[in-house]
Amino acid sequence: MREFESLPAPNSAVRDVQSSFKVRHNQPDCSHNYCGGRFRSLLLPPSTATVGNGTNMVSSFRVSELQVLLGFAGRNKSGRKHDLLMRALHLLKSGCSPAVQIKIRELYRRRYPRTLEGLSDLSTIKSSVFNLDGSSSPVEPDLAVAGIHSLPSTSVTPHSPSSPVGSVLLQDTKPTFEMQQPSPPIPPVHPDVQLKNLPFYDVLDVLIKPTSLVQSSIQRFQEKFFIFALTPQQVREICISRLCLAETSCPQEDNYPNSLCIKVNGKLFPLPIGDFRGYAPPPKNGIEQKRPGRPLNITSLVRLSSAVPNQISISWASEIGKNYSMSVYLVRQLTSAMLLQRLKMKGIRNPDHSRALIKEKLTADPDSEIATTSLRVSLMCPLGKMRLTIPCRAVTCTHLQCFDAALYLQMNEKKPTWICPVCDKKAAYESLILDG
């Protein structure tokens, strides 16, 4: 009897079942243990079966699944698909943990939702019943195939002297597989998502509060429709649409899903190309680079009428482990001069704070051999290389050097990065303070 080195595919396993019954039928004098032994040869050690079956699963993964798997295992997930595949196969063959094996099965089920998970654990085989000449005879438990509870409408014509040797009729030999795939958790319709504040926009009203972009089918590309209506007062204002990750742990920045396509009232909305300068990064390995996230001004395509509702159609490519949400706001756009006026209304920081910061920096540290004896601060703005007129810095900054508030706001009005020009750390508008 030939021993199997690797686990056969589901179809070949079914053919082996059929051929074994042919032998059993054509050789009436064979023992029952022969048929059972034929199937016992299919039983491999769990480790060998797991590696053999896992290799086929990993080999069918796309780049996104390979990156998720390697990231889950704490391995490097950058590089081309061939390099990612080699790392994943090496991870599998070197003896991965049960958690990684479960992750492989989860990714495979999402990749092929209707495919048999495989015959990796034949120790859980259940018995099947085949009807022989109208009578049912039990088969040893070792004959059952994992995941196949029964082979319905399968009959074997008994051998008779008048029939030629080896004539076996199998009807409807297509097995029925019962999948027990756990359904992924459904995100809430309106998640408690908080978007980061946009300093140059005042939110007047929420037309569509953050709504989850739920995957409605197993297809990669999804589509969802939204409808909103404007009141006469809102018609005189403007609209803005925002998309972000459906993450509720912290305020979210604008983030676009892959292959995003937006239609407003049946008209295609042109997405921004590249960064704020209009620069689009070239495709890498034939794949379009991810667009930088920022709010979308859809006013030009909105019906400015309170009698006719507006419809938004969003299509995107689903991603494993990522959920997105969208919202529509009625906003009023502000200018850098208006933000500067609001900043001045917050007041000027007490000069004693700056004096205390200088004393702290000049105080000798007993644990350090290096002591600061002097501090030098320039009166020239690091942005415009001009004399400071409105000295400003963020409350999170620890340096004494300031920058000009007017130039900083004008720069972020053109390209909102909100990065401190001195220490290159985040300096959001809410954290700015005029230095005294």
Image: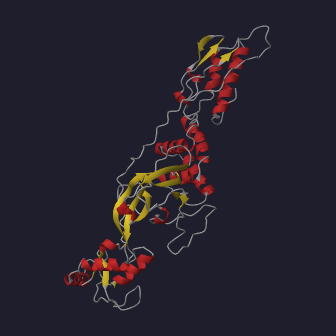
Relative height, residue 43 to residue 159 (above, below): below
What x and y, as percent, mark residue 130?
62, 17
Q: If the image is split into quadrants, where does the N terminus sit?
A: top right
Q: How is the image coloured?
A: secondary structure
What x and y, as percent, mark residue 6?
64, 37
Nearer-the-camera pick, 283 or 213: 213
Relative height, residue 18 to residue 428 (above, below): above
**Residue positioned 62% across, 26% down in the render:** 175
Nearer-the-camera pick, 223 or 160: 223
Q: Is residue 432 left or right of residue 30?
A: left
Q: Residue furthest front?
A: 307
Q: How many marks?
A: 0
Q: If the image is split into quadrants, where does the C terminus sit?
A: bottom left
Q: Is residue 19 left or right of residue 194?
A: right
What x and y, as percent, mark residue 387?
36, 92
**Residue positioned 69% across, 14% down in the render:** 30
**Residue positioned 34% across, 89% down in the render:** 388
Residue 399 makes an appearance in the image:
no
**Residue positioned 37% across, 78% down in the render:** 336
What x and y, as percent, mark residue 270?
54, 64
